[in-house]
Amino acid sequence: MGVFLILASAVAFSTAGFFTRLIELGVWTVLFWRGIYGSLFIAAYVACQHRSETLNAVRSTGLPGFLSVCCTALSTICFVAALRHTTVADVNVIYATAPFFAAGLQWLWTGERESRTTLAASAVALLGVGLTVDGAVAEGHLIGDLLAFVMTGLLATMMVLVRNNRTIPMLPAAAISALSSAALVVPFADPLGANRADMLCLFLFGTTQFGLGLLLLTLGTRHLSATRSAAEIPVACIWMWLAFGEIPSVLASLGGFVVMASVSADILLKRS
């Protein structure tokens, strides 16, 4: 079940680049409405799940929930900003290394050591990221790649928090984090500058990509160790190729292949 949820979240998240390119509004305005619609989507699920105990579920998240809110809110801002400053392929290649970031954080936090398979896969993935970043430097996309690294680190921290607090309902924190991301950018946004077509795209961006993706990721992380599918890389690139004709560079493609292979090998060898 956990694997299915993580895979489904990867597919949902893979549409981020498509929506970011499709909506021509300023990044702060996009982030504002994405956060609003995403928070409403997750909050509706939480309310249906907990009903009269919804407020108690929110209170019970405690310090882990607060830390998760901070990590997720900041990571979503870095994510969309990165997509505006570099290629979708670069962001997703770096993003796919989140399980290895999380494995390292898990070891620092609890002393839980990952298998030799994961350590070897981490080293290979690092090589793939190095190829991707090298291409980004040559193409002038370094800022976007750095934002993607920050986003990945924050997301990995959130995954570790969820995994180590399985008895605490973390979905209320996910809803609050989405709302917090909107609150953080509202001073710089122009919410009324969106027309009807923009609002429809923003609604879909906030619900199907952000809200659904974050919901599935939060649920899936409770059932799995800090391991995540790399399916998002090719799916995201396919979206961009079909809609905008955006083709990854040779180095980004090579780096993506290396990272995807390392994550996939880690998952398959652990299950064998």
Image (cartoon, rainbow, N blue to C red):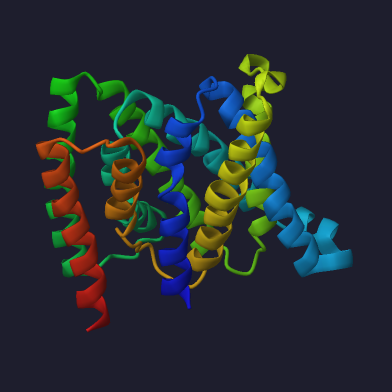
In the picture, the quarter occupied by the C terminus is: bottom left
The one nearer the camera, 237 or 189, is 237
Q: Is residue 35 visible?
A: yes
Spot the residue most to the bottom: 272
The picture quadrant where one finds residue 33 is top right
**Residue 74's spot in the image, x, y percent?**
52, 34
The one nearer the camera, 241 or 61, is 241
Q: In this view, does 41 lie to the left or right of 108?
A: right
The one nearer the camera, 126 or 81, is 81
Residue 43 higher or lower than 222, as above or below: above
**Residue 98's spot in the image, x, y percent?**
34, 51
- Which residue is found at the position 55% from the left and 53% from the top? 214
Q: Is residue 163 left or right of residue 228?
A: right
**Residue 54's spot in the image, x, y percent?**
82, 60
- Which residue is found at the position 51% from the left and 38% from the top? 76
- Which residue is found at the position 62% from the left and 49% from the top? 207
- Which residue is found at the position 60% from the left and 24% from the top? 29
Q: In this view, does 212 lie to the left or right of 85?
A: right
Spot the residue most to the right: 52
Q: In this view, does 20 lie to the left or right of 229?
A: right
Residue 105 higher or lower than 54, as above or below: above
Q: Can residue 67 be seen in this view?
A: no
The one nearer the camera, 31 or 56, is 31
Residue 232 higher or lower than 95, as above or below: below
**Residue 116's spot in the image, x, y percent?**
16, 68
The picture quadrant where one finds residue 139 is top left
